[in-house]
Amino acid sequence: MSKILIIEDEAAIRRVLVKILSEENKTYSVEEAEDGLVGIEKIKKGDYDLVLCDIKMPKMDGVEVLEAAKKLKPEIPIVMISGHGDLDTAVNTMRLGAFDYISKPPDLNRLLNTVRIALDRKELVVENKMLKKKVSKNYEMIGESKAIDRIKNMIDKVAPTDARVLITGPNGTGKELVAHWLHQKSERSKGPMIEVNCAAIPSELIESELFGHVKGAFTSANKDRAGKFEAANTGTIFLDEIGDMSLSAQAKVLRALQESRIQRVGSDKDIKVDVRVVAATNKNLKKEIEEGKFREDLYHRLAVILIEVPSLNDRREDIPLLVDYFANKISQEQGNTKKSFSAKAIKLLQNYDWTGNIRELRNVVERLIILGGKEVSESDVSAFASK
């Protein structure tokens, strides 16, 4: 049932609108508000699919209601109700985010058509928002263990915020998957997600990579170049293996987090950036702090939310699902029929010591598919999965 709110100070107009809408469609649930202040309170507390709002009202006019409502519930379509002398204002409200406007006295066909289109649009907006929340199949998080459920629940709570997140866990556990989930389920999903492997970049180049440089800043700086922070503007930057970052680069990252500004190498000009920072490490950063290798103030800036990704040995109950997922994915990539794994083969894989975690399991599954029989057996695992 579609919920419609009518904000109108003239009782006679309210009654007409309620009568038209209620008689036209029995699935419309129509509520009334006698002025803008009451209307905004109802919008705060209720879940409406459409708002019809008069422009000229005491206490709080329609333009003020529109602006306030768009901040509270931006997805709700708002149709303005205008008197003859309010047409210029009504047109202006379209620039402020109104869906449409209708004139007084309301024309029956015009009113009903506008309402139907607005409700259809609201449904599309909600569907699109839900689709954006779905994570790409390239970054699926497979598992039903309690540890994985805790991570998924944490992501659902944290993703819509701009809170910085530090992801910890051994190599190969899927920390980058958590980072992608955080981005794709966030309000920043339209923006870029820029990944930086801090361990793969030489220490003398990390600052230029992150913050960019100006021409002549160093020998090979032949032209100005933007860094990863600028590239990630309005989106997310994922600093993988941040425990390997040099102390000088850490100081600049700290400043970027504190002030939302960066400076290119060789420049004293501030550049404002709007970036959410997600970091990951396989190191014990508290131990690194004690040894003087990592800044404590940066750690506390990064670890607003801490997500620990378990090793595969700590979630062995997920191995059957992971094997099936990888077997399906690999068969599709190779254009072959999917191979099944016997129950004994799966059991044997569950008993392995997975020091390389998910990454190692994926490689073993691919090896078994290539070298094993039509159904991967226990003997295939014994023969080909050994390290």
Image (cartoon, helix red, strand yellow):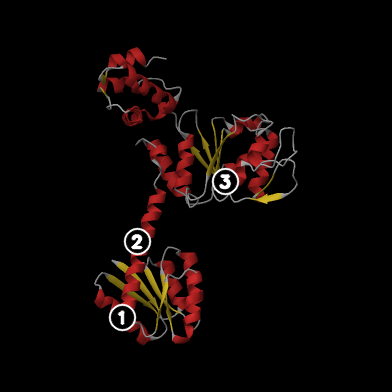
Q: Secondary structure at mark 2?
A: helix
Q: Which mark is residue 260?
A: none
Question: Callout 3, which amino acid?
Answer: Ala
Question: Residue 232 has which mark?
Answer: 3
Q: Are marks 2 and 1 in contact (CB under 8 Å)?
A: no
User: Label 2 belongs to which residue?
Assistant: 123
Residue at the image position 34 percent from the left and 77 percent from the top: 111
Residue 54, how many percent across, how many down? Answer: 43, 80
Q: Earlier in the sequence, mark 2 or mark 3?
A: 2
**Mark 2 belongs to which amino acid?**
Glu
Upstream in the sequence, badge 3 or badge 1? 1
Locate residue 289, reporting x and y percent: 64, 33
Q: Is residue 339 above or below residue 80?
A: above
State the separation of the CA atoms marked 2 and 3: 31 Å
The quadrant of the picture occupied by the N terminus is bottom left
Point out the residue furthest to the top here. 383
Q: Nearer the viewer, residue 248 or 231?
A: 231
Callout 1 secondary element: helix
Where residue 257 sits: x, y (%)?
Answer: 63, 46
Position of the C terminus, as image quadrant, is top left
**Residue occupied by mark 1:** 108
For the residue pair 281 and 16, the one nearer the viewer reads as 16
For disc 2, the neighbor class at 10 Å (few under 14, some 14 to 19, many from 20) is some
* Nearer to the camera, 18 or 132: 132
Q: Residue at x 65, y 29 (%)?
A: 202
